[in-house]
Image: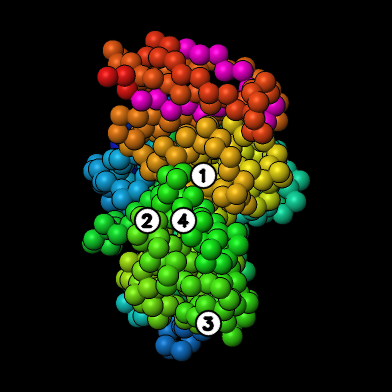
Amino acid sequence: MKKLLIKSALTGYLVCIELLSFGQSIIAGSQTTVLSPDRNLSVQFYQRQDIDKKRTMYYQVTYKGKAVIRESALGLNMDNQLSEKAMALKIDRHKDWCENLEVKQVSTTAHDSSWVPVNGERSLIRDCYNAATIEMVKDDNPIYTFNVEMRAYNEGIAFRYFLPENQKGTYYNIIAENTEFSLPEESTAWFANWAQAPYSKLPLYNWTGESERPLTLELKNGLYVCLAEAQMVDYTRTKFKLSDHKPNTVVTSLFPGGAELISPIGTPWRVIMVAERPGALIENDDIIQNLNESRKIARTDWIKPGKIMRVMNQSTADARANIDFAVQQGLQYILFDWKWYGPAFSFGSDATKVAITDFDLPGIISYGREKGIGVWLYVNQQAALTQSDSLFSVYEKWGVKGVKIGFVQVGSHRWTTWVEDVIHKAAAHHIMINIHDDWRPTGEQRTWPNLMTAEGIRGNEEMPDATHNTILPFTRYLAGPADYTICYFDKRIKTTHAHQLALAAIFYSPLQTLFWYDQPSAFHNEPELAFWKAIPTTWDETKVIQGVPGQYITIARRKGNEWFLGTITNNDPRSLRLSFGFLPRGKKYMASIYSDDQNVRSSTGVKIQKIKIDATTTLTVALTGSGGQAIHLTPVR
């Protein structure tokens, strides 16, 4: 491998680009470099040309001089012949659509602003980056212009392909996206084959299929990287697969069928988050929302986060009992899950009509309103598909607060835009949304904050083990909030009860499902549930105190002047040191500590301690296998 020093068109600095010995030369004038505001991250763009005059776009990413992404190809492949023939335009017959793009201009910009999310892990989000737009045109067909947009944040690198408005109106049929991520040797990835799959830590070879996004990786040089997708709202879902010709390389893999686009339009952002410790990936996950459009809902006072439980037996009496229990336990909502309106997979079921006996839905909604408890309804895709133009209007009149859309189809361009349209239609009628099953967000909750949460996670519907739970914050939750459906009393739980308590602080979801398989009758005044009663679901500040994917994690979250901490271990017991140095100096707090203790005479085995702590305090946390600890801090006045 050879190296070449070139001068960046953006910064004027000399940067080092690796040259692979395959007879291609870098095209003069095609190079540009973008540095992050703190100058730690660098992304370099350039083109090569082979002996047949075919051009290929490439990029590289470094962090403090360490390789993050080695030379990797960029590009889309398209087949626009149907549109070209219909419009009597020149037929583009290039095997690689991008092979004759010529750089015409590079424009640069810097941006620094802040915005307030309706719901979030932080009360204020900074959006700060340097950017470059590489403007190109086909050298034999000038109606085709093509841009690569690159941004460098302190948190990571993002880029996308942008198709400016075509002067002849040609449509774009994308059949492949040829984006590579060539990693340093001996990198490992947290692989999950589908959105609700278990995770495995694998080297970059011999994968059994494709991996979901986000894809978190650990590099041999000590860095942690997350490959993610942002603003995937009018495109085809992209997973990651291994290159079939280039070692240590992950490539994008479009869902079959591709995407049919009308310009002007951009593809989703490809995001490369980079951090020196894995917890920083969690603290920096706002980059995903920053790559989405600003809020499109003017008035948001109806969007209210909260805790929700499912009514297991759908009858009027059980619904009222669940509402009373919700009041007692500090919940805000109850959910009626599928089949309340008939067979959920049948197009013959009407989601505006109750189909079960002894179920007075208007009376239940009214009773909930009196008690301050809102009602959510489940609607399967069949009913949502056929009734969504009128469904949300009906629910708004009924006083329904939210809808859980279930068993949605995902992946194709058609179903991607359909899901996004459902969110928009719901917002028009003041309805909050929770999407199940295999769908994952890509930051669109910034634009449409009525999107409260989504599944796309292996949660307590499958009852995963503790090791799986220690992986999730570093992987799935980087995409956005997830509906894990936390349980407490169900006998199938594979962790301790203190572990389940702590999940409410560790797993972020503005709509947090608790007591998923539980019923009010299972409650016997367990005192430790005071932690769930007090905990909110959105936050002013979030800090990852410590953690390693697959081993353990401690997260501290602040709401107002109170803190909630969750610590969990994997299937193995361990002892951790928990420092409270993140607290403001000079202030004392009363800590209510909920820990596993087999000597406690209760069915749940949770011990409660109260001690005073401050910023100088360090505690030893002894965790049993699959165990956890939850802490609630309140100021001492």
| Mark earlier in primary sequence (2, 3) | 3
According to the image, label 4 marks what residue?
323
Looking at the image, residue 285 sits to the left or right of residue 49; the answer is: left
Above or below, 355 against 195 in this view is below
Looking at the image, residue 130 sits to the left or right of residue 189; the answer is: left
Q: Nearer the viewer, residue 37 or 534?
A: 534
Above or below, 245 against 602 in this view is below
C-alpha separation, residue under disc 4 versus residue under disc 3: 25 Å
Would you say residue 494 is visible in this rendering?
yes
According to the image, label 2 marks what residue?
371
Q: Are marks 2 and 4 in contact (CB under 8 Å)?
A: yes
C-alpha separation, residue under disc 2 versus residue under disc 1: 33 Å
- Residue type, mark 2 in image: Lys
- Residue type, mark 4 in image: Ile
Residue positioned 44% across, 39% down in the render: 533
Q: In the structure shown, which secondary structural element does the residue marked by tag 3 occupy? A: loop
According to the image, label 3 marks what residue?
350
Question: Which residues are drawn in magenta?
Answer: 618-634
Q: Position of residue 445 (x, y in %)?
A: 39, 55
Q: Quadrant of residue 409?
A: bottom right
Q: Are marks 4 and 1 in contact (CB under 8 Å)?
A: no
C-alpha separation, residue under disc 2 versus residue under disc 3: 28 Å
- Residue type, mark 3 in image: Asp
Mark 2 Cα shell of 10 Å, populated few (<14), some (14-19), many (≥20):
some
Q: In the structure shown, which secondary structural element does the residue marked by tag 2 occupy? A: helix
- Residue type, mark 1 in image: Tyr
According to the image, label 1 marks what residue?
477
Looking at the image, residue 476 sits to the left or right of residue 101; the answer is: right
Asked if residue 444 is among those painted magenta in the image, a careful observer would answer no
Q: Nearer the viewer, residue 636 or 165?
A: 636
